[in-house]
Amino acid sequence: MAAYSAELESELRQQLGNAGFNPLTRSIFKWTKSPAEVSHVVFFEVWRGIEPMLTAWSAASSVSAERFATSCLQATGLRVYESLRTRSDKELAMRFALGRVAMWAERSSIPRLSTGIAQSVQIAVASIQDVFVPLCNRTRTKRELADYLCQDCEPFPWLFSNEALRVAAIAWLRHTSGDDLADVVRLLEDQRRGVSNSLRNEVTRDVFLGIIKQRLEAEVRDVSGGI
Protein backbone atom coordinates (compact mmCIF):
# COMPACT_ATOMS: atom_id res chain seq x y z
CA MET A 1 0.00 0.00 0.00
CA ALA A 2 1.39 3.38 -0.99
CA ALA A 3 1.39 6.59 1.02
CA TYR A 4 -1.29 9.23 0.73
CA SER A 5 -0.34 12.56 -0.79
CA ALA A 6 -1.52 15.89 0.56
CA GLU A 7 -3.25 16.54 -2.77
CA LEU A 8 -5.20 13.27 -2.58
CA GLU A 9 -6.25 13.94 1.01
CA SER A 10 -7.42 17.43 0.06
CA GLU A 11 -9.43 16.18 -2.93
CA LEU A 12 -11.07 13.43 -0.90
CA ARG A 13 -12.09 15.85 1.85
CA GLN A 14 -13.47 18.40 -0.57
CA GLN A 15 -15.33 16.12 -2.97
CA LEU A 16 -16.63 13.72 -0.34
CA GLY A 17 -17.66 16.63 1.83
CA ASN A 18 -19.74 17.94 -1.05
CA ALA A 19 -21.28 14.46 -1.36
CA GLY A 20 -22.28 14.33 2.31
CA PHE A 21 -19.39 12.43 3.93
CA ASN A 22 -17.25 13.63 6.84
CA PRO A 23 -13.68 12.40 7.49
CA LEU A 24 -13.01 10.07 10.41
CA THR A 25 -9.34 9.81 9.41
CA ARG A 26 -7.31 10.83 6.35
CA SER A 27 -8.72 7.86 4.43
CA ILE A 28 -12.01 6.93 6.14
CA PHE A 29 -15.24 8.87 5.63
CA LYS A 30 -18.69 8.50 7.19
CA TRP A 31 -22.05 9.46 5.70
CA THR A 32 -23.37 12.49 7.56
CA LYS A 33 -26.93 11.12 7.62
CA SER A 34 -26.03 7.87 9.36
CA PRO A 35 -28.21 7.36 12.48
CA ALA A 36 -26.67 6.43 15.80
CA GLU A 37 -27.49 2.70 15.45
CA VAL A 38 -26.20 2.15 11.89
CA SER A 39 -22.90 3.18 10.27
CA HIS A 40 -22.21 3.97 6.61
CA VAL A 41 -18.49 4.30 5.97
CA VAL A 42 -16.13 4.44 2.98
CA PHE A 43 -12.49 3.32 3.31
CA PHE A 44 -9.85 4.41 0.78
CA GLU A 45 -6.46 2.89 0.06
CA VAL A 46 -3.69 3.63 -2.43
CA TRP A 47 -1.93 0.63 -3.98
CA ARG A 48 1.43 0.88 -5.70
CA GLY A 49 1.54 -1.04 -8.97
CA ILE A 50 3.21 0.23 -12.10
CA GLU A 51 1.34 3.37 -11.16
CA PRO A 52 -0.52 4.21 -7.93
CA MET A 53 -4.13 2.99 -7.89
CA LEU A 54 -7.02 4.19 -5.75
CA THR A 55 -9.27 1.57 -4.17
CA ALA A 56 -12.34 1.96 -1.97
CA TRP A 57 -14.36 -0.27 0.34
CA SER A 58 -17.86 0.55 1.60
CA ALA A 59 -19.58 -0.65 4.76
CA ALA A 60 -23.21 -0.48 5.81
CA SER A 61 -22.99 -2.06 9.23
CA SER A 62 -23.26 -1.58 12.99
CA VAL A 63 -20.42 -1.36 15.48
CA SER A 64 -22.54 -2.99 18.18
CA ALA A 65 -23.64 -5.83 15.90
CA GLU A 66 -20.07 -6.52 14.79
CA ARG A 67 -18.84 -6.36 18.38
CA PHE A 68 -21.39 -9.04 19.31
CA ALA A 69 -20.47 -11.10 16.23
CA THR A 70 -16.74 -10.96 16.92
CA SER A 71 -17.34 -12.05 20.51
CA CYS A 72 -19.20 -15.09 19.15
CA LEU A 73 -16.32 -15.91 16.81
CA GLN A 74 -13.79 -15.58 19.61
CA ALA A 75 -15.90 -17.90 21.77
CA THR A 76 -15.19 -20.68 19.25
CA GLY A 77 -11.54 -20.67 20.37
CA LEU A 78 -10.23 -20.40 16.82
CA ARG A 79 -6.90 -18.59 16.91
CA VAL A 80 -7.55 -16.81 13.61
CA TYR A 81 -10.19 -14.67 15.37
CA GLU A 82 -8.29 -13.93 18.59
CA SER A 83 -7.28 -10.41 17.54
CA LEU A 84 -10.47 -9.50 15.65
CA ARG A 85 -11.97 -6.31 17.07
CA THR A 86 -14.67 -3.83 16.07
CA ARG A 87 -14.45 -0.95 18.50
CA SER A 88 -15.45 1.93 16.23
CA ASP A 89 -16.63 2.86 12.74
CA LYS A 90 -13.00 2.81 11.64
CA GLU A 91 -12.78 -0.97 12.21
CA LEU A 92 -15.95 -2.23 10.52
CA ALA A 93 -15.29 -5.63 8.94
CA MET A 94 -18.39 -6.16 6.80
CA ARG A 95 -17.27 -4.20 3.73
CA PHE A 96 -17.62 -4.64 -0.01
CA ALA A 97 -15.25 -3.51 -2.75
CA LEU A 98 -16.86 -0.45 -4.30
CA GLY A 99 -14.75 -0.78 -7.43
CA ARG A 100 -15.93 -4.34 -8.07
CA VAL A 101 -19.57 -3.28 -8.07
CA ALA A 102 -18.88 -0.08 -10.03
CA MET A 103 -16.69 -2.07 -12.45
CA TRP A 104 -13.51 -0.06 -12.06
CA ALA A 105 -10.32 -1.30 -13.69
CA GLU A 106 -7.63 -3.74 -12.53
CA ARG A 107 -8.01 -4.98 -8.93
CA SER A 108 -11.27 -3.00 -8.66
CA SER A 109 -9.12 0.14 -8.60
CA ILE A 110 -8.88 3.45 -10.41
CA PRO A 111 -5.51 3.53 -12.23
CA ARG A 112 -3.29 6.47 -13.20
CA LEU A 113 -3.77 8.12 -9.82
CA SER A 114 -0.44 9.92 -10.08
CA THR A 115 -1.47 11.85 -13.20
CA GLY A 116 -5.09 12.66 -12.38
CA ILE A 117 -5.91 12.80 -8.69
CA ALA A 118 -8.90 15.12 -9.00
CA GLN A 119 -10.38 13.04 -11.84
CA SER A 120 -9.78 9.77 -9.97
CA VAL A 121 -11.53 11.07 -6.87
CA GLN A 122 -14.36 12.33 -9.03
CA ILE A 123 -14.84 8.82 -10.45
CA ALA A 124 -14.82 7.36 -6.95
CA VAL A 125 -17.32 9.87 -5.60
CA ALA A 126 -19.65 9.31 -8.56
CA SER A 127 -19.61 5.58 -7.81
CA ILE A 128 -20.31 6.24 -4.15
CA GLN A 129 -23.33 8.31 -5.10
CA ASP A 130 -24.56 5.72 -7.63
CA VAL A 131 -23.89 2.55 -5.61
CA PHE A 132 -23.44 3.32 -1.93
CA VAL A 133 -25.70 6.27 -1.11
CA PRO A 134 -28.86 4.43 -2.31
CA LEU A 135 -27.85 1.56 0.02
CA CYS A 136 -27.33 4.04 2.86
CA ASN A 137 -30.85 5.32 2.34
CA ARG A 138 -32.24 1.77 2.49
CA THR A 139 -30.43 0.84 5.72
CA ARG A 140 -31.21 3.57 8.24
CA THR A 141 -32.51 1.25 10.99
CA LYS A 142 -31.23 -1.95 12.55
CA ARG A 143 -34.08 -3.93 10.99
CA GLU A 144 -33.41 -2.52 7.53
CA LEU A 145 -29.73 -3.32 7.97
CA ALA A 146 -30.56 -6.90 9.00
CA ASP A 147 -32.81 -7.32 5.95
CA TYR A 148 -30.01 -6.09 3.69
CA LEU A 149 -27.48 -8.47 5.23
CA CYS A 150 -29.88 -11.41 4.81
CA GLN A 151 -30.01 -10.87 1.06
CA ASP A 152 -27.62 -12.65 -1.27
CA CYS A 153 -27.23 -9.98 -3.94
CA GLU A 154 -25.15 -6.99 -4.96
CA PRO A 155 -23.50 -4.97 -3.67
CA PHE A 156 -22.62 -7.43 -0.86
CA PRO A 157 -23.40 -11.05 -1.76
CA TRP A 158 -22.58 -13.72 0.81
CA LEU A 159 -19.70 -14.97 -1.34
CA PHE A 160 -17.68 -11.87 -0.42
CA SER A 161 -18.31 -11.89 3.32
CA ASN A 162 -17.35 -13.84 6.40
CA GLU A 163 -20.55 -15.85 6.71
CA ALA A 164 -20.20 -16.62 10.41
CA LEU A 165 -19.63 -12.97 11.29
CA ARG A 166 -22.57 -11.96 9.12
CA VAL A 167 -24.98 -14.52 10.60
CA ALA A 168 -24.14 -13.45 14.15
CA ALA A 169 -24.53 -9.76 13.26
CA ILE A 170 -27.94 -10.44 11.67
CA ALA A 171 -29.06 -12.28 14.81
CA TRP A 172 -28.07 -9.37 17.06
CA LEU A 173 -29.72 -6.81 14.79
CA ARG A 174 -33.00 -8.72 14.62
CA HIS A 175 -33.02 -9.48 18.34
CA THR A 176 -32.35 -5.87 19.34
CA SER A 177 -34.99 -4.72 16.86
CA GLY A 178 -37.60 -6.53 18.94
CA ASP A 179 -37.76 -10.01 17.41
CA ASP A 180 -38.50 -12.84 19.83
CA LEU A 181 -35.48 -15.04 20.50
CA ALA A 182 -37.29 -18.09 19.09
CA ASP A 183 -37.87 -16.20 15.83
CA VAL A 184 -34.21 -15.22 15.70
CA VAL A 185 -33.16 -18.86 16.18
CA ARG A 186 -35.41 -19.91 13.28
CA LEU A 187 -33.82 -17.18 11.18
CA LEU A 188 -30.38 -18.52 12.04
CA GLU A 189 -31.39 -21.95 10.80
CA ASP A 190 -32.35 -20.39 7.47
CA GLN A 191 -29.10 -18.41 7.23
CA ARG A 192 -26.62 -21.25 7.67
CA ARG A 193 -25.07 -20.85 4.19
CA GLY A 194 -21.28 -21.26 4.26
CA VAL A 195 -20.81 -20.70 7.99
CA SER A 196 -18.56 -23.75 8.28
CA ASN A 197 -16.12 -22.28 5.77
CA SER A 198 -15.66 -19.19 7.96
CA LEU A 199 -15.02 -21.49 10.91
CA ARG A 200 -12.24 -23.31 9.03
CA ASN A 201 -14.38 -26.47 9.25
CA GLU A 202 -13.01 -26.86 12.80
CA VAL A 203 -16.25 -25.80 14.49
CA THR A 204 -19.61 -27.09 13.29
CA ARG A 205 -22.44 -24.80 12.25
CA ASP A 206 -24.66 -26.10 15.03
CA VAL A 207 -22.03 -25.36 17.67
CA PHE A 208 -21.59 -21.80 16.40
CA LEU A 209 -25.33 -21.17 16.18
CA GLY A 210 -25.54 -22.47 19.75
CA ILE A 211 -22.94 -19.90 20.82
CA ILE A 212 -25.00 -17.12 19.22
CA LYS A 213 -28.16 -18.33 20.95
CA GLN A 214 -26.45 -18.55 24.36
CA ARG A 215 -25.06 -15.03 24.06
CA LEU A 216 -28.41 -13.61 23.00
CA GLU A 217 -30.05 -15.38 25.96
CA ALA A 218 -27.42 -13.85 28.24
CA GLU A 219 -28.30 -10.39 26.90
CA VAL A 220 -31.97 -11.07 27.61
CA ARG A 221 -31.11 -12.03 31.21
CA ASP A 222 -29.00 -8.90 31.61
CA VAL A 223 -31.81 -6.68 30.38
CA SER A 224 -34.40 -8.39 32.61
CA GLY A 225 -32.15 -8.19 35.65
CA GLY A 226 -31.26 -11.86 35.76
CA ILE A 227 -34.83 -13.14 36.00
Image (cartoon, rainbow, N blue to C red):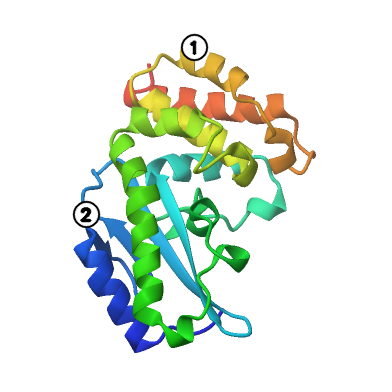
Residue 20 to residue 33: above or below = below
Q: Quadrant of residue 225?
A: top left
Which quarter of the rendering shows the C terminus?
top left
Q: Residue at x 56, y 55 (%)?
A: 84
Q: Secondary structure at mark 1?
A: helix
Can you give x and y, in whole percent of width and height, for residue 135 in the image?
Answer: 36, 41
176 and 192: which is toward the camera: 192
Can you give x and y, in whole percent of width and height, for residue 42 in the image?
Answer: 39, 59
Q: Residue furthest right?
A: 202
Residue 100 to residue 123: above or below = above
162 and 180: which is toward the camera: 162
Can you give x and y, in whole percent of width and height, for residue 168 in the image?
Answer: 53, 34
Q: Quadrant of residue 17?
A: bottom left
* Badge 1 density bin: few <14, some 14–19, many ≥20, Cα 10 Å: few
From where the camera sits, is residue 167 visible? yes
Q: Residue at x 29, y 33 (%)?
A: 141
From where the camera sits, is residue 219 visible? no
How many badges with numbers are in the image? 2
Q: Residue at x 43, y 63 (%)?
A: 43
Label 2, label 1: how far apart the Cα atoms are: 36 Å
Q: Quadrant of residue 30?
A: bottom left
Q: Which residue is mark 1?
A: 182
Q: Residue at x 76, y 44 (%)?
A: 200
| Nearest to N terminus: mark 2 or mark 1 | 2
Q: Which residue is mark 2?
A: 32
Q: Secondary structure at mark 2?
A: loop
Look at discs 2 and 1 and give the one toward the viewer: 2
> Mark 1 is on which residue type?
Ala
* Badge 2 density bin: few <14, some 14–19, many ≥20, Cα 10 Å: some
